[in-house]
Image (cartoon, rainbow, N blue to C red):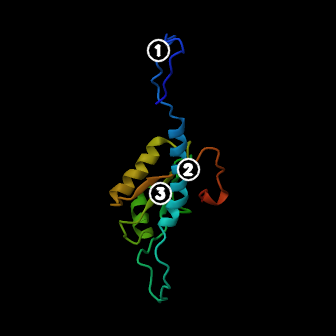
């Protein structure tokens, strides 16, 4: 703690200062933070071992998600293939090979009618799929031409 001393003549011009100086505390905490930030990745490494090589298949066989897209006119697409609204249920089952745990990404055009996006999500839920996600873009991110569904007439 910091404090003030009295004058030589015995009188006091000001009350004793009882404020704590926190600058050294902040300095020590910042040094500790830097030490832990540098040391933390080094602690996560285990003992180096030479792993054997095997001819086994991966345990988590993750299939890519199925993309259901709705364009500005309200047309439905599964991946790049245009589908009718009433056959969306059957097309999803065939695209997923009846795997109800398959991930579905719903991509709605920003100018699409809200009801069409909800209709697509309702049909996906009605088909029994539980892993459904809405896809959006980060601000100022350009849309790649390959990600846009092809127009089928």
Nearest to the eye among marks 2 and 1: give it. Answer: 1
Task: Please tell me how many numbered marks the rendered image carries.
Answer: 3
State how far apart marks 3 and 1 are (Cα). 69 Å
Picture residue at 52% right of the left edge, 66% below the top: 42
User: Helix or strand or loop: what does disc 3 sit on?
Assistant: strand
Nearest to the eye among marks 3 and 2: give it. Answer: 3
State how far apart marks 2 and 1 are (Cα). 75 Å
User: Helix or strand or loop: what does disc 1 sit on?
Assistant: loop
Residue 108 in sight: no
For disc 1, the marked residue is 15
Q: Nearer the viewer, residue 26 or 144?
A: 26
Question: x and y percent of residue 86 in the render?
Answer: 41, 56
Q: Earlier in the sequence, mark 3 or mark 2?
A: 2
User: Helix or strand or loop: what does disc 2 sit on?
Assistant: loop
Mark 3 and 2 residues: CB-CB less than 8 Å, in contact? no
For disc 3, the marked residue is 105
Q: Nearer the viewer, residue 115 or 62?
A: 62
Question: x and y percent of residue 130 in the render?
Answer: 35, 58
At label 3, counting other C-alpha atoms closer than 10 Å, the crowd grade (few under 14, some 14-19, many 20 or more) is some
Residue 88 in sight: yes
At label 2, counting other C-alpha atoms closer than 10 Å, the crowd grade (few under 14, some 14-19, many 20 or more) is many
Q: Is residue 134 above or below residue 5?
A: below
At label 1, counting other C-alpha atoms closer than 10 Å, the crowd grade (few under 14, some 14-19, many 20 or more) is few
Q: Is residue 129 above or below residue 31?
A: below
State how far apart marks 3 and 2 are (Cα). 14 Å
Picture residue at 40% right of the left edge, 51% below the top: 121
Picture residue at 59% right of the left edge, 58% below the top: 149
For disc 2, the marked residue is 71
Q: Earlier in the sequence, mark 3 or mark 1?
A: 1
């Amino acid at each position: 703690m910091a404090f003030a001393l009295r004058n030589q003549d015995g009188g006091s011009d000001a009350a004793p200062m009882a404020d704590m100086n926190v600058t050294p505390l902040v300095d020590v905490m910042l040094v500790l933070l830097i030490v832990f930030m540098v040391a933390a990745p080094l602690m996560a490494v285990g003992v180096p071992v030479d792993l054997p090589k095997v001819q086994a298949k991966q345990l988590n066989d993750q299939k890519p998600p199925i993309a259901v897209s709705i364009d500005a006119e309200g047309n439905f697409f599964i991946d790049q293939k245009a589908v009718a609204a009433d056959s969306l249920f059957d097309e999803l089952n065939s695209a997923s090979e009846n795997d109800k745990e398959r991930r579905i990404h719903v991509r709605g055009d920003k100018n699409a009618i809200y009801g069409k996006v909800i209709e697509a999500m309702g049909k996906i839920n009605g088909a029994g799929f539980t892993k459904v996600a809405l896809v959006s873009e980060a601000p100022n991110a350009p849309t790649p031409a390959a990600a846009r569904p092809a127009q089928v007439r």
